[in-house]
């Protein structure tokens, strides 16, 4: 298992493990999730295996997730300093307070101080904008985040669940003004959620943001627990997050994953995780574990290497349908290249190309 084969996150020098431990399930305050004791065991085992990247948010399990990490890791400087601890702002913990969440300066600065207190640390390694706040100008958000970086309370910043055009505006604005810019992009990405490949993934590749996919198993739909054979017999434990996806399309993907898993003597979940981790631009995939056994099992996905043929089969089975203008891209080489090959891409010249002897008007 190669959790200690670190990668840099996007176009930065921040070294992170290829799998990130998602802590959304730390604490059973909502009736699900891991107990404090098991959360601590999961943290310890992840670190023991070489993992150094832990992701949480200010309002996960009503802020208990941050507190569990702080109690077990943050207060011990020798352990804390070797980890990359990421948390998020935007979520509002305080009913009746309109400034308790969102991405305005007042909210960001307050959320950061509270997260530092719960995490029991002087700094946050990676501070994520959790989701786009349509009511706040992006330059206000980026200026506030730059102040936190300059103060030393935050090392790097990232962005999650935000349109590609808004992220591009944020980073270009920051670069022109000499502010810190986003180095990471957190998005839902799996064999069952590939629409991000239309805008978000190309944007990340162009601007140098390291992608950290969340829900790589689509809320468990690709865990191997739900198959065509037991359809309707096994109750999904995530209710509406999962039930909608237990359909023919999903079972077709699971069938293909089962075939590949059998050939490699591994599991459906590991094959699905391997596919996500091998996608262009992906730095570190977020794996959540409510049980220590789940962590042990999923980490073994790093040893699974898909062949070109296996990847092509899964790609073809789950290929997303893009809208305009990406839907027109297949004809662009014919328009652009004049019947030549450019960077390995060939297309015959378009009908608008001048024929021998013809001159442009």
Image (cartoon, rainbow, N blue to C red):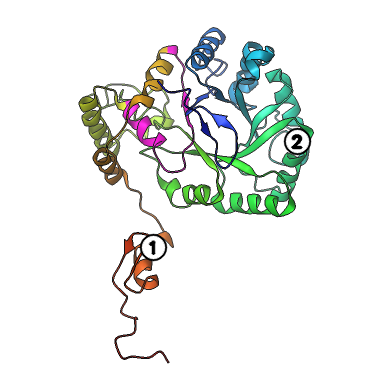
In the figure, is residue 6 to the left or right of 311? right
Q: Is residue 132 visible?
A: yes
In the foreground, 1 or 170: 1
In the figure, is residue 182 to the left or right of 292? right
- The residue carrying pointer 1 sits among few (fewer than 14), some (14 to 19) or many (20 or more) residues within 10 Å by Cα, namely few
In the figure, is residue 34 to the left or right of 62? left
In the foreground, 19 or 257: 19
Task: Name the quarter where the C terminus is drawn.
Answer: bottom left
The residue identified by callout 2 is 148
C-alpha span from label 2 to label 1:
41 Å
Q: Tag 2, which secondary structure?
A: helix
Q: Is residue 337 above or below residue 200?
A: below
Q: Is residue 319 above or below residue 274?
A: below
Q: Residue at x 27, y 37 (%)?
A: 307
Q: Residue at x 57, y 16 (%)?
A: 29
Picture disc at residue 329: 1
Where does the image place residue 137, in percent across and percent down from the top left?
71, 50
Q: Tell me whether the residue at label 2 lies in contact with that at label 1, contact meaning CB atoms closer than 8 angstroms.
A: no
Where does the image place residue 287, in percent across and percent down from the top left?
46, 26
Query: What count of labels does the image hold?
Result: 2
Instruction: Specify the segment rendered in magenta.
Output: 269-292
Q: Is residue 102 above or below residue 239?
A: below
First along the sequence among labels 2 and 1 = 2
In the foreground, 293 or 48: 48
Picture disc at residue 350: none
Q: Residue at x 54, y 7 (%)?
A: 37
Where does the image place residue 271, in percent across and percent down from the top left?
32, 29
Q: Tag 1, which secondary structure?
A: helix
Occupied quadrant, residue 209: top right
In the foreground, 290 or 280: 280
Task: Name the quarter where the N terminus is drawn.
Answer: top left
């Amino acid at each position: 298992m190669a959790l200690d084969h670190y990668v840099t996150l996007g176009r930065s020098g921040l070294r992170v493990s290829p799998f990130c431990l998602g802590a959304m399930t730390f604490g059973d305050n909502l009736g699900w999730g891991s107990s404090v004791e098991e959360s601590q065991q999961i943290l310890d085992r992840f670190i023991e295996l070489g993992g150094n990247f832990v992701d949480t948010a200010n309002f996960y399990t009503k802020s208990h997730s941050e507190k569990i990490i702080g109690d077990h890791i943050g207060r011990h400087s020798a352990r804390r300093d070797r980890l990359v601890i990421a948390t998020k702002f935007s979520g509002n913990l305080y009913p009746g307070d309109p400034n308790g969440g969102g991405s305005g300066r007042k909210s960001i600065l307050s959320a950061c101080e509270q997260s530092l207190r719960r995490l029991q640390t002087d700094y946050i390694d990676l501070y994520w904008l959790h989701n786009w706040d349509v009511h706040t100008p992006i330059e206000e958000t980026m200026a506030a985040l730059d102040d936190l970086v300059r103060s030393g309370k935050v090392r790097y910043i990232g962005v999650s669940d935000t349109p590609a055009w808004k992220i591009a505006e944020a980073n270009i604005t920051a670069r022109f003004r000499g502010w810190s810019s986003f180095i990471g992009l957190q998005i839902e990405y799996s064999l069952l959620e590939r629409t991000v490949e239309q805008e978000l993934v190309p944007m990340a590749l162009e601007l140098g943001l390291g992608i950290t996919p969340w829900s790589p198993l689509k809320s468990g739909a690709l865990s191997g627990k739900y198959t065509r054979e037991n359809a309707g017999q096994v109750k999904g434990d995530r209710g509406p997050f999962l039930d909608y996806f237990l359909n023919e399309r999903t079972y077709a993907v699971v069938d293909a994953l089962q075939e590949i898993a059998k050939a490699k003597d591994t599991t459906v979940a590991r094959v699905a995780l391997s596919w996500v981790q091998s996608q262009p631009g992906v730095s570190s995939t977020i794996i959540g574990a409510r049980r220590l056994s789940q962590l042990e099992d999923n980490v073994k996905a790093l040893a699974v290497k898909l062949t070109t043929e296996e990847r092509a089969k899964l790609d073809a089975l789950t290929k997303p349908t893009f809208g305009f203008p990406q839907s027109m891209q297949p004809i662009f080489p014919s328009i652009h290249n004049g019947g030549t090959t450019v960077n390995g891409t060939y297309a015959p010249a378009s009908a608008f190309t001048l024929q021998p002897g013809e001159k442009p008007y």
